[in-house]
Image (cartoon, rainbow, N blue to C red):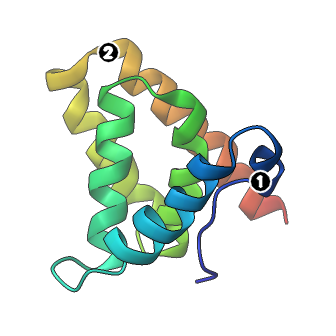
Amino acid sequence: MPKQSAPQELAAIAPKLVEVTDEVLFAEVWERPGLSPRDRSLVTVSVLAALYRSEQLGYHLGVALDNGLSVEELSEAITHLAFYAGWPNAMTAVNQLKTIADARNAG
């Protein structure tokens, strides 16, 4: 998987945020040995969906697929969290997953 990074165009307005995103979040936190990238992706997608952070969710659904999670596994996780985090959150997440899966299947 390619190394994750913050959108570099944001460096013009928030250079420190881009720097700590790249150097702390993606270079240190995501690379820690305690969880696999696949497991980190499952946790991240679940939290983003549960908290209705849909702007970041699409990106991380793609990363989750790249990290070895299947569409079926992500769909199951989203279905499970619907009962704990709310139906609208799950429906938003599953719609984003469908869009990403369809785009990957078409490409």
Q: Quadrant of residue 10?
A: top right
Determine contact: label 1, label 2, CB under 8 Å: no
What is the quadrant of residue 41 in the picture? bottom left
Give me the disc on residue 10: none
37 with respect to 11 (left or right): left
Image position of 11 with respect to 5: above or below: above
Residue in the picture at 22% in, 86% down: 33
In the image, residue 66 sits, relative to residue 80, either above or below, namely: below
Gap in angstroms between the C-alphas marked 1 and 2: 24 Å
Residue at 32% in and 15% down: 87
Q: Which residue appears at 83% of the width and 49% of the height?
A: 9
Position of the C terminus by quadrant: bottom right
Residue 97 placement: quadrant:
top right
Label 1: element kind: helix
Rendered location of residue 51, percent (x, y) = 33, 25
Q: Residue furthest front?
A: 16
Q: Residues within 10 Å of mark 2 (few under 14, many from 20)?
A: some
On-image quarter of the N terminus: bottom right
Residue type beneath disc 2:
Trp
The earlier-in-sequence mark between 1 and 2 is 2
Residue 42 image point, x, y percent: 31, 58
Residue drawn 63% across and 65% down? 5
In the rendered structure, the answer to whether residue 32 lies left or right of residue 17 reads left
Under tag 2, what secondary structure? helix
Tell me where residue 59 appears, x and y as whole percent. Answer: 60, 50
In the displayed structure, 50 sits above or below 21; it is above
Residue assigned mark 2: 87
Label 1 Cα crowd, 10 Å radius (few <14 / some 14-19 / many 20+):
few
Residue located beneath label 1 in the image: 103
> Residue 82: x, y in percent?
25, 25
Residue 79 vertical placement versus 22 (above, below) = above
Q: Amino acid at mark 1?
A: Ala
